[in-house]
Image (cartoon, rainbow, N blue to C red):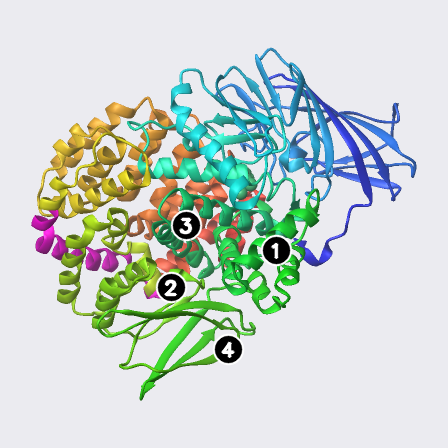
């Protein structure tokens, strides 16, 4: 177990590293020349699955001890040169960490601890040095970080930690453009993809240029090399990687055209291109001292990419989407056995801490700090952070200190958000008399936890729906009492506007008040939240459905005013949302049935109205912009009601000129249509896209959401699964486990997933560990499901597992 309290600064410095790669599919030779000074007489370097060929100190072979994970030798106190030769097998590297091959292209993934799979090195983020790299091989394209000196020879002038190293070699097509920075430097932009896919890079390139400009205008951050390269590969464990000057992407987050990418894909491409680009300052120039500080770069960079997308699209709609993601991914994680603080204090396997807590809750902690100290102090604090820590590997404390200094206040209470796991619950009650309203708040945290700072934006509405005023209050004690005066009538409160505090709220509101807020609140976030809260009351607390159904009709009528917003307002909580609300003794079959009953009732009441609107809501020629995407998403929300009421969506599917509508229609039919239409359209979709892996994954996901264990097993025997690919696997098995609760949460579902985890763990531990996260909610299931899951996990734990999977299963069983 690695512990934060055990952190020790390195006792050596690496002045420079020179790497030579003699590429060979099965036997690549890596020669690493380190110029070093050390305060200690022994030096231990990290390694993983390396064949050591030789070690020389100052030109002479030297005694050393090599283990499967380290290389140790004695070194002098004077500056020395260490030359280490290793051999690696990129073709056999199915873990996709270190140097591997994707469709014949050599590429690397070094975060978090992949560099040690290339050569022996102090593979920790606080060891920064400058790299020169020489690559020899027969591939026409030989890329690494920094600026190219000659073909295959690269120098990166910016000191960096090993996790930001990258190499790509292969035969790829390229799309080129340029960007002129705010100080007038011309930067070459290059996106590398498989030959023939160049026309699919236009949106990624446009997103990149917009990201570069936005970082200059919003944060004053300019790019710092002569070239910025993106390489898209089809085998990748995550979304993308911010390697200095040479980002490597999962190709599903690069390639797009209207026929093969949905609006959601376009939004993801924009957001992820931006995220990786923004890391150049928040992550690369200022990096983490150790992996416990991961949220220093990830939370901040998520915050920055959320702000970028808000500026590019609709801010309220983006906020609704971000909070939906936060609740479904992070609140769910925090409610189960994998719960951990934004800054964990210990880990067995760091790969398992690239979580919604570190990323998304980390971003919320920064967003809340901005509300607490105000926009000006927040901007000044970030400027100070960039100035003070440029070139350093630093900590979350030192980040927060920058804001404390400019705001001239302590942020100790706020900083507890980094240390204390769990979602705070705020209990709310009010008293009203003679024009005075007293608001009582109580924060409920885990046993032993101290109060956190909860900044709550509160709106006050008159009973006829007029906005009276808004105030931001901060609850930083267990209990708070806030007094507001001079009301003519008792106001209606709109609490936690914009989800200003990342908390759950317990405020027993009547159905009438929720309906009132759903139609009158001036805050879009809370208007939608009121609809959701009301829906959850109907679905989990037996509230009368009739007035909710009437409200839903009103929302449909209003929907052309702001299609993107209303598409969200008209989307009912998912089965997983309902399960989270119930919290314990969950019966997924009952949830599905209850939800379905409401869905059918809504369709019965409103399909006609929906149909009339659907046909008037024209989207015109395809454009990926947010307004057009909003119209398409509303059309699909309406189509859903129509299909439930028997409308045949085949024509909509067949005539669609873009994937959003084609796939949207297909999804409506798969979830709600009749079997014959479903089978016909699924067969068509399969035939249309079987040669396009990223679109075919959508077919697999739809299958995974509905299929039985047997059907998933059968599908896994198919030709697309003969070669392991993380996207394919997650699309079918990952979606089955995460988004098909009635089939997964059965003994057969649990046993199947455990068998699969055992099999896939031998191929790719990061993928098996991530898919295993689907078990995170098993403790809140009803019996005998809970017991069946426990037994399946226990049986799995008896096998020899990777560190990654073992860590997840151990925490799950604890
Ligand atoms: N910083 C990157 C993280 C990442 C990663 C981590 C572990 C294993 C594989 C990985 N690929 C990318 C991505 C990001 O947050 O930008
Ligand atoms: Zn990131």
267 or 209, nearer to the observer? 209
Q: Is residue 231 magenta?
A: no
Which secondary structure lies at badge 3? helix
| CA distance for labels 4 and 1 | 28 Å
Q: Position of residue 364 (x, y in %)?
A: 49, 57
Dominant SS type (magenta): helix
Q: Residue at x 23, y 42 (%)?
A: 631
Residue 724 shows up from this direction: no
Q: Earlier in the sequence, mark 2 or mark 1?
A: 1
Q: Position of residue 647 (x, y in %)?
A: 9, 41
Q: Residues within 10 Å of mark 1 (few under 14, many from 20)?
A: many
Question: Mark 1 sits on what residue?
Answer: 381
Q: Which of the numbered marks, if any, corresponds to residue 774? A: 3
Circles 3 and 1 in contact, beta carbons < 8 Å? no
Foreground mark, 2 or 4, reads 2
Foreground mark, 2 or 3, reads 2
| CA distance for labels 2 and 3 | 31 Å
Q: Magenta stretch?
A: 582-610
Q: Earlier in the sequence, mark 4 or mark 1?
A: 1
Q: Is residue 613 left or right of residue 115?
A: left
Q: Earlier in the sequence, mark 2 or mark 3?
A: 2
Question: Mark 2 sits on what residue?
Answer: 497
Q: Earlier in the sequence, mark 3 or mark 1?
A: 1
Q: Residue at x 25, y 55 (%)?
A: 569
Q: Position of residue 428 (x, y in %)?
A: 38, 76
């Amino acid at each position: 177990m690695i512990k934060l309290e055990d952190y020790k600064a390195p006792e050596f410095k690496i002045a420079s590293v020179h790497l030579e790669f003699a590429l060979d599919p099965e036997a690549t030779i890596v020669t690493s020349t380190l110029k070093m000074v050390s305060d200690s007489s022994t030096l231990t370097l990290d390694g993983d699955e390396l064949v050591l060929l030789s070690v020389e100190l100052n030109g002479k072979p030297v005694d050393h001890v090599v283990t499967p994970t380290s290389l140790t030798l004695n070194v002098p106190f004077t500056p020395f040169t260490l030359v280490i030769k290793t051999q690696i097998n990129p073709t056999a590297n199915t873990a996709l960490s270190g140097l591997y091959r994707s469709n014949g292209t050599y590429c690397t993934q070094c975060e978090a601890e992949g560099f040690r799979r290339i050569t022996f090195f102090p593979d920790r983020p606080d060891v920064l040095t400058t790299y020169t790299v020489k690559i020899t091989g027969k591939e026409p394209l030989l890329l690494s970080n920094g600026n190219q000196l000659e073909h295959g020879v690269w120098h990166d002038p910016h000191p960096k930690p090993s996790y930001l190293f990258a190499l790509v070699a292969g035969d790829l097509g390229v799309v080129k453009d340029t960007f002129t920075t705010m100080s007038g430097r011309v930067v070459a932009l290059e996106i590398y993809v498989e030959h023939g896919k160049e026309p699919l890079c236009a949106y990624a390139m446009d997103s990149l240029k917009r990201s570069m400009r936005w970082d200059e205008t919003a944060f004053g951050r300019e790019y710092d090399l002569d070239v910025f390269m993106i390489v898209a590969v089809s085998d990748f464990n995550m979304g993308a990687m911010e390697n200095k000057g040479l980002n490597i992407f999962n190709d599903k987050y690069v390639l797009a055209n209207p026929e093969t990418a949905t609006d959601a894909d376009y939004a993801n491409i924009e957001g992820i291109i931006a995220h990786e680009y923004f890391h150049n300052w928040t992550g690369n120039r200022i990096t983490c001292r150790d992996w416990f500080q991961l949220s220093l770069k990830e939370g901040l960079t998520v915050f920055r990419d959320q702000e970028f997308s808000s500026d590019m699209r609709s801010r309220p709609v983006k906020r609704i989407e971000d909070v939906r993601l936060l609740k479904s991914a992070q609140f769910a994680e925090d409610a189960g056995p994998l719960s951990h603080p934004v800054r964990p204090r210990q880990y067995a396997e760091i790969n398992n801490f690239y979580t919604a807590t570190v990323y998304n809750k980390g971003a919320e902690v920064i967003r809340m700090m901005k509300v607490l100290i105000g926009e000006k102090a927040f901007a000044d604090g970030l400027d100070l952070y960039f100035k003070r820590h440029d070139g350093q590997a630093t900590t979350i404390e030192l980040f927060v200190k920058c804001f404390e200094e400019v705001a001239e206040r302590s942020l100790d209470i706020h900083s507890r958000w980094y240390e204390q796991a769990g979602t705070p619950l705020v209990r709310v009650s009010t008293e009203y008399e003679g024009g005075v309203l007293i608001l009582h708040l109580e924060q409920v945290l885990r046993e032993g936890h101290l109060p956190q700072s909860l900044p709550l934006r509160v709106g006050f509405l008159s009973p006829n729906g007029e906005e009276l005023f808004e105030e931001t209050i901060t609850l930083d004690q267990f209990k708070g009492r806030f007094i507001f005066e001079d009301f003519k009538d008792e106001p209606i409160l709109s609490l936690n506007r914009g989800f200003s505090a990342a908390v759950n709220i317990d405020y027993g509101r009547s159905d009438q008040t929720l309906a009132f807020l759903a139609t009158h609140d001036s805050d879009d976030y809370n208007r939608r939240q009121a609809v959701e809260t009301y829906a959850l009351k109907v679905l989990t607390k037996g509230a009368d459905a009739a007035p909710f159904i009437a409200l839903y009709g009103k929302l449909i009528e209003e929907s052309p005013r702001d299609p993107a917003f209303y598409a969200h307002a008209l989307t009912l909580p998912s089965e997983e949302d309902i399960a989270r609300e119930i919290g314990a003794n969950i019966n997924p079959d009952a949830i599905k049935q209850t939800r379905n009953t409401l869905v059918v009732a809504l369709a019965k009441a409103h399909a006609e109205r929906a149909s009339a609107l659907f046909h008037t809501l024209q989207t015109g020629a395809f454009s990926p912009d947010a307004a057009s995407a909003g119209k398409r998403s509303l059309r699909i929300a309406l189509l859903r009601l129509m299909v439930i009421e028997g409308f045949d969506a085949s024509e909509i599917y067949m005539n669609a000129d873009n994937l959003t509508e084609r796939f949207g229609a297909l999804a409506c039919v798969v979830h709600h249509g009749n079997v014959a239409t479903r089978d016909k359209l699924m067969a068509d979709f399969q035939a249309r896209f079987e040669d396009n892996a990223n679109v075919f994954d959508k077919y697999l996901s739809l299958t995974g959401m509905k299929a039985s264990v047997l059907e998933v097993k059968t599908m896994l025997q198919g030709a697309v699964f003969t070669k392991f690919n993380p996207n394919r696997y997650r699309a079918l098995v990952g979606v089955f486990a995460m988004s098909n609760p009635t089939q997964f949460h059965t003994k057969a579902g649990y046993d199947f997933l455990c068998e699969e985890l055992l099999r896939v763990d031998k191929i790719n531990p990061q993928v098996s560990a991530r898919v295993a996260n689907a078990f995170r909610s098993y403790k809140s299931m009803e019996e005998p499901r809970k017991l069946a899951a426990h037994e399946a996990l226990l049986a799995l734990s008896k096998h020899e597992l990777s560190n990654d999977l073992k860590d997840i299963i151990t925490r799950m069983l604890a």
